[in-house]
């Protein structure tokens, strides 16, 4: 349905049946110590003060040259922040802490195997290792400011060290999640035109030592075939002194990174002064169609945004011990394991492995041992841990002051378990909505200033001005509870600069939909299209309904997948649920649910209860045609449920390539189950 032809208005047709949840006030002792408890921040950052209000965030950083202009908006939507300013990200994340805090631990590295020793890396040691690797990159690989390097590294210290070494030189890093295939890595090497690949022989995940160099070789071969040869592959050893890969080191191309770093022992590299609007890194993100897009993030605007949101949303302080369980290979890891927390000089946990290896108690043993007080994870991980044993976390002495979720809407049921079982009802929860393209949080509560509402991300952060549009580009009245397309009206410093090498696609993907005058130089004519459906309730809180393309249209009524799934999850015994619209020649599209159960739940009882819950909570229009009890749901490596695959299976179509899933075997299992 193309824009303009549609007579249908999302506002009228997405049924919204969420019940408003009761709000929960943050505990007073949290409020008393919070980094941001001043309600005036919303006034200071109101539209009247745009864009200069963002200077407050830029001042959280150290600049080698102060900026002349907060925003250059002369060429929308290519906005430049803090123009004239110069800084270096590695200086902000490391050097500036050294005078007072060289001894403070930057990361506790925790190997997956419980037999192995942990490593505490201080800011002083981090500085040494970053400088040495930067020296290797410059002297041994000939890399210069502006070159691209692909990082294909697991969750070990070498990954953030490599990112910061690149940042020190002004080399643009492009991190590829280690769980991705060699082919996916090759695609990103070619698009970014990287000549150097940094990787590791092997790493531990899910109880196994996985051969990683084999995949790096495949990536290099495929990139070469596509005309982008890797000239230097730096290979770290997971266990220095051992080489744990079937793939041999290739003469003339592959270099033993541990040896190179040893040769540069004690080397120091002067940080490259970067313009605020220069590129710090690329992070590829895939949509449903087309090749992955390289979100190109800036040095100044990005770093200011992640520092500010880490401080005010996550409430990070230097003396905290913070743990974000994401993988650094995703944007969450870049922003909220590496750049944000380091800019604030805190201590973090870096855990190599899977949260449930060897058992679901692992995260809580780690948290207890290190006195972790800030915790950050995804709704998928919350559901997995709840499924494994809902009572287990209560046995541990967990002292979380604040907890965060990111990546998907969290169902109120899962939220409440997170709050009670893990937070012991004492920790505040922030449900942070944002995207790879955004750099950092856009919608979330500020935990000392707002009450929490399970299932709603929260109001917009200070300085962010969202609008919900209907299909025709009419703004849906604020607070009306009607669904539409979520957009952000104004530019903000953390937003990507462009799609690497494809400005046209950038404009088309994020701006063309609601821009009516491509020649306009006024930022107000350039709302950013997020691609998510959302509703805003009277109190200003946004509830995210999922990607626009996940909406199910039943007999002309649009139903948000998330609210159907949420209704399934209210039934005791259901641990995970995915609802999809399945086409039927006679009946059109009908919703079907795929559910996974907690151990010991009786399938028949649960199935009936799920059907009843959906009809009762949402209405007969949403009646589930079938409920499939499955062992697990197909998920991406970042934990997103692949509803597209479930639709194909239910419609008896080929689900396509499933190799990049976290659990490809489940697709075959569900296929067999549906065929029998
Ligand atoms: O649909 C939204 C969902 O994740 C998408 C962005 O995914 P990605 O670029 O991989 O970034 C993940 C880390 C931010 C969004 O378009 N999403 C993200 N956070 C939330 C969310 N949906 C609901 N609630 C959230 N808190």
Image (spheres, rainbow, N blue to C red):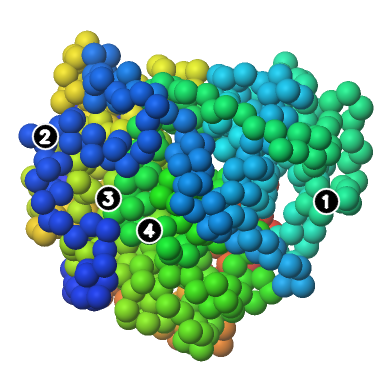
Q: Residues within 10 Å of mark 3 (few under 14, many from 20)?
A: many
Q: Earlier in the sequence, mark 4 or mark 2?
A: 2
Which of the two discs, 3 and 4, sits closer to the camera? 4
Q: CA distance from mark 1 to mark 2?
A: 53 Å
In the rendered structure, are the residues bearing label 4 and label 1 in contact, judged by CB atoms less than 8 Å apart?
Answer: no
Please name the residue that numbered disc 1 is placed on. Answer: 240
The one of 1 and 409 positioned closer to us in this rendering: 409
In the rendered structure, are the residues bearing label 3 and label 4 in contact, judged by CB atoms less than 8 Å apart?
Answer: no
Q: Earlier in the sequence, mark 1 or mark 3?
A: 1
Which of the two discs, 4 and 2, sits closer to the camera? 4
Asked whether residue 414 appears in the rendered view, the answer is yes
Which of the two discs, 2 and 3, sits closer to the camera? 2
Judged from the image, the secondary structure of the residue bearing numbered disc 3 is loop
Please name the residue that numbered disc 4 is placed on. Answer: 316
Give the percent coordinates (x, y) of residue 285: 50, 37
Please name the residue that numbered disc 2 is placed on. Answer: 49
């Amino acid at each position: 349905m193309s824009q303009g032809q549609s007579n249908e208005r999302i506002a009228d047709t997405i049924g919204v049946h969420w019940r408003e949840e009761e709000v929960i006030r943050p505990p007073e002792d949290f409020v008393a110590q919070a980094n941001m408890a001043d309600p005036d921040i919303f006034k200071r950052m109101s539209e009247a003060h745009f864009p200069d209000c963002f200077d407050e965030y830029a001042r959280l950083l150290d600049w080698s040259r102060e900026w002349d202009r907060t925003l250059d908006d002369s060429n929308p939507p290519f906005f430049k922040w803090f123009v004239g300013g110069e800084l270096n990200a590695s200086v902000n994340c490391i050097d500036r802490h050294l005078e007072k805090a060289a001894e403070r631990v930057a990361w506790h590295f925790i190997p997956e195997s419980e037999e192995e020793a942990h490593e505490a890396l201080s800011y002083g040691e981090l500085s040494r290792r970053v400088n040495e690797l930067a020296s290797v990159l410059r002297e041994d690989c000939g890399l210069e400011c502006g070159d691209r390097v692909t990082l294909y590294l697991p969750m070990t210290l070498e990954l953030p060290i490599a990112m910061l070494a690149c940042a020190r030189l002004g080399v643009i890093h492009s991190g590829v999640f280690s769980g991705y295939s060699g082919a996916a890595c090759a695609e990103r090497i070619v698009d970014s035109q990287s000549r150097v690949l940094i990787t590791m022989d092997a790493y531990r995940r899910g109880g196994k030592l996985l051969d990683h160099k084999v995949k790096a070789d495949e990536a290099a071969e495929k990139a070469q075939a596509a005309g982008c040869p890797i000239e230097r592959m730096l290979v770290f050893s997971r266990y220095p002194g051992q080489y744990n890969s079937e793939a041999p080191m290739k003469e003339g191309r592959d270099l033993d990174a541990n040896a190179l770093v040893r040769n540069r022992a004690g080397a120091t590299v002067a940080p490259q002064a970067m313009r605020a609007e220069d590129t710090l890194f690329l992070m590829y993100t895939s949509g449903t169609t087309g090749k992955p897009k390289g979100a190109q993030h800036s040095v100044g605007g990005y770093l200011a945004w992640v520092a500010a949101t880490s401080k005010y949303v996550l409430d990070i302080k230097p003396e905290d011990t913070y743990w974000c369980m994401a993988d650094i290979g995703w944007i969450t890891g870049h922003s909220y394991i590496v750049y944000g927390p380091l800019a604030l000089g805190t201590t973090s946990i870096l855990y190599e492995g899977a949260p449930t290896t060897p058992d679901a108690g692992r995260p809580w043993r780690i948290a207890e041992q290190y006195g972790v007080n800030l915790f950050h994870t995804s709704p998928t991980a919350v559901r997995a841990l709840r499924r494994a044993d809902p009572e287990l976390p209560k046995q541990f002495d967990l002292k979380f002051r604040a907890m965060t979720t990111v990546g998907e809407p969290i169902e109120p049921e899962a939220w409440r378990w997170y709050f009670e079982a893990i937070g012991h009802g004492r920790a505040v929860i922030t449900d942070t909505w944002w995207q790879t393209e955004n750099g950092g949080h856009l919608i979330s509560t500020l935990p000392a200033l707002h009450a929490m509402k399970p299932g709603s991300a929260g109001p917009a952060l200070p300085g962010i001005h969202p609008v919900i549009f209907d299909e025709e580009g009419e703004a849906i009245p604020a607070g009306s509870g009607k669904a539409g397309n979520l957009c952000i009206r104004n530019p903000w410093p953390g937003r990507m600069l462009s799609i690497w090498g494809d400005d046209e696609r950038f404009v088309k993907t994020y701006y063309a939909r609601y821009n009516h005058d491509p020649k306009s130089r006024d930022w107000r004519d350039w709302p950013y299209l997020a691609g998510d459906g959302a509703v805003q309730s009277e109190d200003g809180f946004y509830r995210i309904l999922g990607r626009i393309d996940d909406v199910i249209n039943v007999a002309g009524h649009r139903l948000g997948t998330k609210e159907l799934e949420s209704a399934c999850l209210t039934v005791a015994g259901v641990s995970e649920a995915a609802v999809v619209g399945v086409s039927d020649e006679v009946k059109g599209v009908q919703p079907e649910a795929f559910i996974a159960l907690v151990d010991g739940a009786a399938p028949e009882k649960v199935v009936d209860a799920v059907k009843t819950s959906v009809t009762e909570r949402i209405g007969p229009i949403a009646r589930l045609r079938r409920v499939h009890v499955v062992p697990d749901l197909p998920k991406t490596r970042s934990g997103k449920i692949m509803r597209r695959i479930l639709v194909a299976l239910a419609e008896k179509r080929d689900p396509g390539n499933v190799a990049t899933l976290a659990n490809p075997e489940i697709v075959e299992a569900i296929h067999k189950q549906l065929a029998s």
